[in-house]
Amino acid sequence: MPEPKNIEICVLRYHPEHDPEPAWRSYQVPCTDDMSVLQGLQHIKDEIDGTLGFRWSCRMAICGSCGMMVNGKPRLSCQTFLRDLQPGPVRIEALAHLPIERDLIVDVGEFVNKLEAIKPYLIPREPRTLAEGEYLQTPAQLERFEQYTSCINCMLCYAACPEYGLNRDFIGPGVIALLHRYNADSRDGGQAQRQPILNAEEGVWSCMAVGYCSEVCPKQVDPANAVNQNKAVSARDYFLRFLAPKGAAP
Amino acid sequence: MDVAEVDVAIVGAGGAGLRAAIAIAESDPSLSVALISKVYPMRSHTVAAEGGAAAVTQAHDTLEAHFHDTVAGGDWLCEQDVVEYFVGQAHQEMVQMEHWGCPWSRKPDGHANVRAFGGMKIERTWFAADKTGFHMLHTLFQTSIRYPSIRRFDEHFCVDLIVEAGRVQGLLAIEIASGGFRLIRARSVIIATGGAGRVFRENTNGGIVTGDGMALAYRHGVPLRDMEFVQYHPTCMPGTGLLFTEACRGEGGFLLNKDGYRYLQDYGLGPAEPTPRNKAMELGPRDRLSQAYWHEKRKGRTLSGPHGEVVHLDLRHLGEKRLRERLPQIYELAVQYLGVDPAAAPIPVLPAVHYTMGGISADGLTAAPLAGLYSAGECSSVGIHGANRLGSNSLTELLVFGRVAGMEAAAYARTVPHGAPTKIGALAEEARARALAILARPSGGERIATLRREMAQSMEDGCGIYRTAAAMQATCDKLAELQQRYRRVQIDDRSRVWNTEWLLAIELGFLLDVAQAIAHSALSRRESRGSHQRLDGFAERDDAHFLKHSLAFHDGDGPPRIAYGPVKITRSQPGTRAYGAAGEQADAERRAREDVHA
Amino acid sequence: MNLDGGVPRPFVRPMRGWWRRDPFFVRYMLRELTAVAVLAYAVVLAVGVVRLSQGEVAWNGWLAALRAPWSIVLHVLILAAMAVHAWSWFQIMPKTLPMIFVGGRRLAGATITRAGWLATALTSIALFALARWWQS
Amino acid sequence: MKRSNAPLFWLPFGAGGMLAALTGTMLVFITGIAVPLGWTLRAELMSYPHVLALAQHGWARGLLLAVIALFAWHAVHRIFHSLHDLGIHSGATAKLVCYGGAFALTVITAASLWSIAH
Ligand SMILES: Cc1cc2nc3c(=O)[nH]c(=O)nc-3n(C[C@H](O)[C@H](O)[C@H](O)COP(=O)(O)OP(=O)(O)OC[C@H]3O[C@@H](n4cnc5c(N)ncnc54)[C@H](O)[C@@H]3O)c2cc1C
Ligand code: SF4
Ligand code: F3S
Ligand code: FES
C-alpha cells in the first residue's frame, strides 16, 4: 500500500429529523493516490461517523447512484480521485438543485416520474413477431441514437442546469435525451406520441441552451444536443400542425 | 405498518426480477405485481455486466454445442435437462430484447453481431458495445414502465419473508426514505436479489451484492445449493476489484507474466497462437485461468504491485482505434482508475471473486422446495452453471429463467387465495420487531465495518482459488465467532429517515449466513471440481462420491447442515474437461463415441 | 398510507446568486448580457432611420452624435459584445443541430463551430469590401 | 401537457441571433467606429444622399428593417429570459415591456422607412 497522507473532507450534512437546515462538517481522512472521493466517504462512514448518508453501488461509473457536488461541480464520486483534489479541503455537497432527503442523498422520485412519463420504450414502427427474428438495423442507423442510450440516469446534468434549478417542472436534459433516444431509433414509430411532451413549456422550451449539462455528463450523452435539436422539431410541429392536423413531425 | 396486497411479489429489480415482472404483466395484465428493490432498478448490479449474453445464433453453431460447452464448463455438475431448455430458449430471448429496443451491436448487414467468449466453442455472445448488462437492464426497466400492473417499490429493503401455513405469503420491507415498514402480502414470491460476491474481500461486485435473498430463503428452511462454487474472474483491477471483461481476451488480448510470456500455454491451454482460438489459451474458462495465475504467483513469476501480485493483460497489439471502438469502457476504466493507456502499456490484473454459481435451490421451473417461492438470476441455483459458470451464460439466464419464474409464480398465484390477514400481520409484527431491535442495541458494541472486513478476509484466506481443509476449517471457526460478535453489532445512527447504517447492519447478517453456507459446503466437498480446487489430497474430481449437489440447510444458531442431492445427467456423461489442443482432441473423441452410440 | 417511520422533510436549497457559483455560469450570463448591446445597436440604427426620414439636418445631427467621444466608447463596447455574441453563438451551434454525417462520418461539433466562425469572418470581409466599394 | 407558444418567439430570436453573429460585429465597426472616425472608411459612406439612396432601394430597405427588427427581437427575448434567470419573475409585465418594446421599435422603423420611400 502506498503511504497515506491526510486530506480534509467537508461534507454538507442534513438530517431532517433534527436539523433545521444543512450545515458543513469536516473530517480528516487518510488518503492514498488511488482513492476516489467515494472511498473517502466510505472511510468516514466505516471508521469515523456511521451516520453519514450517501448512495453508491457499482463504484465503476455505471450505476449512476453516486452523483454529488465535489468542490462545486457535479461529479460521480466513484470516478473522482482525491489525488486530483490535493491538498484539499474537499467540499462535498448533495447534487445541486435537487431536494436533499438526507446528507448527500437527493430526491430521485421527481426524475423517475418524468422518465416514466415520456414513454421510454420502443413503440414499434412495424410490429414484428419473435419468429420473424430481429429488426435489421445497420451500424449507421445505430450510431444515430447510440450516444443517447448511454445515459446512466445519474442526474449530474440536472445539478448542472440552472433552468432546472429555477423550475423543477422542467423535464430536463437527461430525460429529454432518453426521449430523443427512442425517437431517433430506426425501429421506433412513437415520435408523434412523445411530441406533446417536447412541445410543452416544461419540455424543450424551458431550456436556455446553457449547455453545462453536456459539459458535466460523465457518459458523453450530450443532453444539450438532444434538447436543443428538438426545438427545431417542436417549432416545425407548431406550424405544420395547421397543415397536417395530426401534428406528426417527420 | 402499511400493508399492500398483490398477486405476485418480486424481490429484486435487476435483470431477472424485471424480466419476471414483464413476463407476468404481458401474459396476464389482471395479475398485480409488486416489484421491490433496495435501489432504483437501473442501479441493480446487472448494470455492471460488460461482455455479453450467449445464444446460439450462427448457422454453423448448434444447440448441442452450447449444451456441451455449458455442461463441460460446469464440470458436469449441471442439471442437463435444465441446460437443454436453457440453450433452446436463449436465442428467442435475445430477439425479444431486440424487439424491446436493446441496442445490440450490429453487423454491416443489420443483423445482431456475436463475439467469442471464454469456454464457448463458437462465437455466440450477443453484445452491446462493452456495456451489455447496462443496456439490457435499462431496456428491461424502461420496457417495464409500459405495464400498469407492475407496481414498483423502489428503495425498499426487504428484511424478511412471511411464511405461513407452509407457504410464502408475502414479505416485509423497509421504505428506506422514511424508515417505515411495509408489509406486502402476495400469493407467490420470486426472489431475484442477485449474487453474494461481497462476502469476499477482492471482488467485482457492487456494494449492494450482499446475498440478501439467499439468506432470506435459507432462514426459512430452503437449502442453498452448490454454494462452494464461487467464480474468480482472472482479469480484475488490483485494489478495487473492478472487472476488465472477458471480451478483452475475446478481442484478442494476451495474458503475460513478468517475463512477458503467455504463461497459459504451460497449463494445458496451448498452443499459443497470435489470434484467439475459442476455448484455448486466453479464451479458456475462468477457473483455469485464475488457477494458472495462482501457480505463476507461487513460482514467483508475477509482478509486485501496490495491491498485491499481478500479471499483465496486454491489449496493445489491438491498436487504439479498435480498442476505442470495441472496448470503450475498458479503455476509460484503465486510463481513469489506473492511469494506464491500454494502447500503450499492458494493464496489471489479478483474479477477484466475481460470481456465485450456487444459490437458492430451485427445480428446472425455478420453484423452491417451499410452496409459493421461486427464484431467478444469480441468487438462484436452477442448475445451469454447475461447478463453474461460462461467461455470458448468466445474462442469458436472467432472461430465460426470469421469464419462467414469472410464468410459474403467476400460475401458482392463480391457484391459491390470500392467507388470513391476522396471522400474517402477527408474523410481520415479529419481523418488524427483530429489525427494530438492531436500532436499539446498546452502544459500545462491535463496528459493522470491522466484522465485515474480518469476514471478507477470512473468506479469501479459506475459500479462495485453492483450498485446504485446515484453511477452510479456520474460516468456518472465524465465521462462527463473527456470528457471535454480530449479536453485539452497534450502530451510530438511531434515526429512521435514510438510515443506511441500519441497512448495512442487516446486510451484514445476510452476508454472514451466506458465508457460512459457502465455507461449510466447501469444507465438506472432498474433491476438486470446477471452481472448487483443493490441494490437500483431493486434487482430482471424484465422481463416485461427489457427482452431487451440495445442499446447505440453515440450522438455528449453529453452522449449516450439509446434505447432498442428485445431479440430472441426460446426454453427457462426465468426461475430462480439456481445453486448447487437448480439448479439441477430447471433443473429437466424444463425438466419435456418440456416433457409435447413435 | 400508514407508515411508521420518520418524517421525510426534503430540503430545497435557494437559487439566489446561482450564476456566481461556477465560471461556466458567469460565462453564460456574459453571453446573455450581449443582448443588451444588440438591443442598444438596434435602437441606435432605428433612431438613425427616424432621423433620416426627418430630413438632412436631422440626419446630420445623428451623424454628429455618432462622432461624439461617448458614442465611440459606446460602440467599442457594443463591438466587443457583438464579437462575444458571435463567438458564443457558434459555440452552442452544434447543440442545436441534428447529427450531420459527411461521407459516413459524423461531423464533429468543433468543426461546425469553426465553420460558423469562418462564416462570420467571410461575411465581415464581404461587408467591409462592400462598404469600401460603395463609399466612392 | 399544454403546448407552448415559444416557437413564435424562438424563431425570430434565432434568426436575429444568427444575423447578429454573422454581421453584427462588422456593422458596428462600420457605422459606429470606422465612419465616425473616418478611419479606414470615408465619411461620405454615410452622407445623407448616400444613405437616402440606400433607404429608397427596395432590397436594401428590407435588409435594414430586418437587421433592426431581428436584432431587437433577439435581444429582448434574451433579456426577458435573463430576468427569469435572475429570479425577477415579473411575468406578464416584463413580457409586455420586452416584446412590446421590440414590436414598437419595429413599427417605428417600418413607418419611417415607408415615409422615406414615399
Ligand atoms: C462486473 C460484472 C460483469 C459481468 N459480466 C457479465 C457478462 O458479460 N455476461 C454475463 O452473462 N454475466 C455477467 N456478469 C454476471 C451477471 O451480470 C449477474 O449474474 C447478473 O447481472 C445478476 O442479475 P440479477 O438480476 O440476478 O441480480 P442483480 O442485477 O444484482 O439485481 C439484484 C436486485 O435485487 C435487489 N435486492 C437485493 N437485495 C434486496 C433486498 N434485501 N431488498 C430489496 N431488494 C433487494 C437489488 O436492489 C437489485 O434490484 C457480470 C457480473 C459482474 C459483477
Ligand atoms: S445525460 Fe449524462 S449527466 Fe444526465 S443523467 Fe444521463 S448520464 Fe447523467
Ligand atoms: S444546462 Fe439546461 S438550459 Fe438547456 S442546454 Fe442544458 S438543459
Ligand atoms: S457507484 Fe455507481 S456510478 Fe458511482
Image: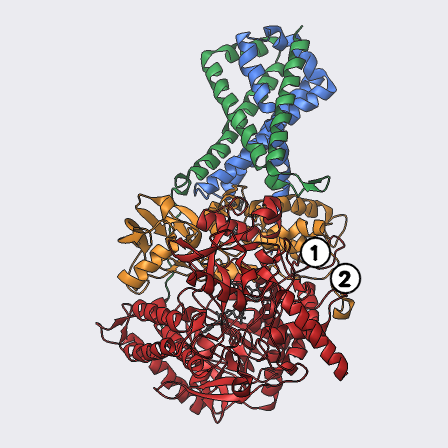
Chain colours: A orange, B red, C green, D blue
The residue where tag 1 is placed is: B106
Asked whether B144 or B383 is in front, the reply is B383
Query: Which is more toward the observer, B398 or B518?
Result: B518
Q: Which mark is residue B379?
A: none
Other-residue count near label 2 (Cα within 10 Å), few / some / many at <14 / 14–19 / ≥20 = few
Judge depth for marks 1 and 2 and give the one in front: 1
Q: Is residue B515 left or right of residue B438?
A: right
- Residue B294 locus on image (x, y percent): 45, 64
Task: Decide if residue A117 is in sight here.
Answer: no
- The span from disc 1 to disc 2 (Cα, nearest Å) is 19 Å
Residues packed near mark 1 inside 10 Å, few (<14), some (14 to 19) or many (20 plus): many
Q: Amino acid at mark 1?
A: Arg
Q: Quadrant of residue C100?
A: top right
Which residue carries the number 2 mark? A126
Residue C22 located left or right of residue A131: left
Chain letter belonging to callout 2 = A
Residue type highlighted by circle 2: Glu
